[in-house]
Amino acid sequence: MSQKGAVAVLVGLVLVVLCIFGALAIDISMITLTKAELQRVSDAASLAGCRRLGLGYETGTISEADITLIAQDTAYSNVAAGKKIEVADDDVQVGHWDFDTRTFTSPTSTPNAVKVQARRDNKSNSPMPTFLARIFNKESVEVTAVSIACIGSSSEGKPLFPVGISEQWFKNKELFCDQPIRFYPTNDPSGCAGWNVVTGDPASANALKKLLEQLKAGTYDPPDVYVGDNLNYVGGTLAAAFPYMKELFDWMKTRDEDGNPETWTVVLPVYESSDCSNPGGWIKTVGFATVVITHVLEAPEKTIDGTVICDQVNPGEAKGPGDYGTIGTIPVLVK
């Protein structure tokens, strides 16, 4: 073989290799781009569907058909590889997301999550056509993306009653739902709680008394508190502040919207703790719980009793990591 012939053969082989790498580069880029676009579609659709789930909890009417339709409409308003994305009914699932195991199960009687799969495959929207890969008899590629959006533990609240509950109280849901809790006195298994001072003043009986007076007079509007925020806590009897607790309870029980003029339903922060001892100092907020305060008894009893209520809704963000019986309604992506 002549030298020119050898070079020609070598050039031919190089061109074949270049074609192979060119096919891979162009088609892999398109697959990657389409995957990213499908992911955005499934993200948007699962969030929209889960937001409808959250609104269902607010209104008391949860419709899986509505959730599916909203997710599908949201998906169809987006494109992947130049094609509007249709989502099949069975590619929208309403179920339950477990924050501990990070698993999704469906169906469930208490849904908190929506899972959406967006496709460019033989089931929906047709596979994505290839370009140079066609020379190797690969005319299309199937691409899919999955997202899960969840409404979790309520992650924001406004402490209208300066009490927080220890995280320890919520270790077993079967034991804390609809169960009585005694906020006063603290440092007791039946009163796994403490007093918080939202104003930032050092926690004390005088600071608590001042806060209670301002709350009743309407001269202090507590700021919104979020998961991760620190509140200043103190435990103990704080007898000097007790009459003001009683006055605030009597004032608020006829002004809340729970339908019972003898009780006060309020959302309370849950603070980070592994026991029920008296809290002290700045402690992180890990969630929020709904409590019906039933009694504030004056001397000699000096007790504050309530009931922790589950399956409650606190409109707002829902990204708290734990389960304290109260959910938010604005979803977050968990997968």
Image: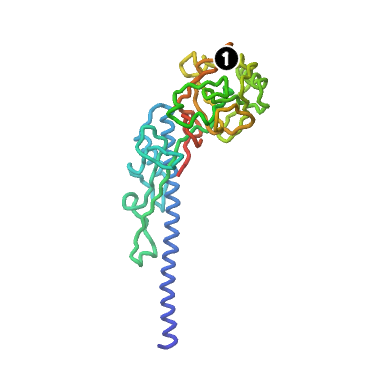
Seen at 64% across and 21% down, the residue is 208
Residue 144 visible from this viewpoint: yes
Farthest residue, direction bottom: 2
The quarter in which the N terminus is drawn is: bottom left
Total marks placed: 1
The quarter in which the C terminus is drawn is: top left
Q: Position of residue 101 (x, y in %)?
A: 44, 42
Q: Circle 1 is placed at which residue position?
A: 302
Q: Relative to 308, is 261 above or below?
A: above
- Label 1 neighbourhood size at 10 Å, few (<14), some (14-19), many (20+)? some
In the figure, is residue 81 to the left or right of 276?
left
Residue 73 visible from this viewpoint: no
Seen at 33% across and 65% down, the residue is 137
Farthest residue, direction left: 123
Q: Position of residue 128 (x, y in %)?
A: 37, 56
Q: Position of residue 65 (x, y in %)?
A: 34, 35
The colour scheme is: rainbow
Callout 1, which amino acid?
Lys
Q: Foreground: 14 or 287?
A: 287
User: Circle 1 — which element?
Assistant: loop
Q: Position of residue 104 (x, y in %)?
A: 40, 41
Seen at 47% across and 42% down, the residue is 333
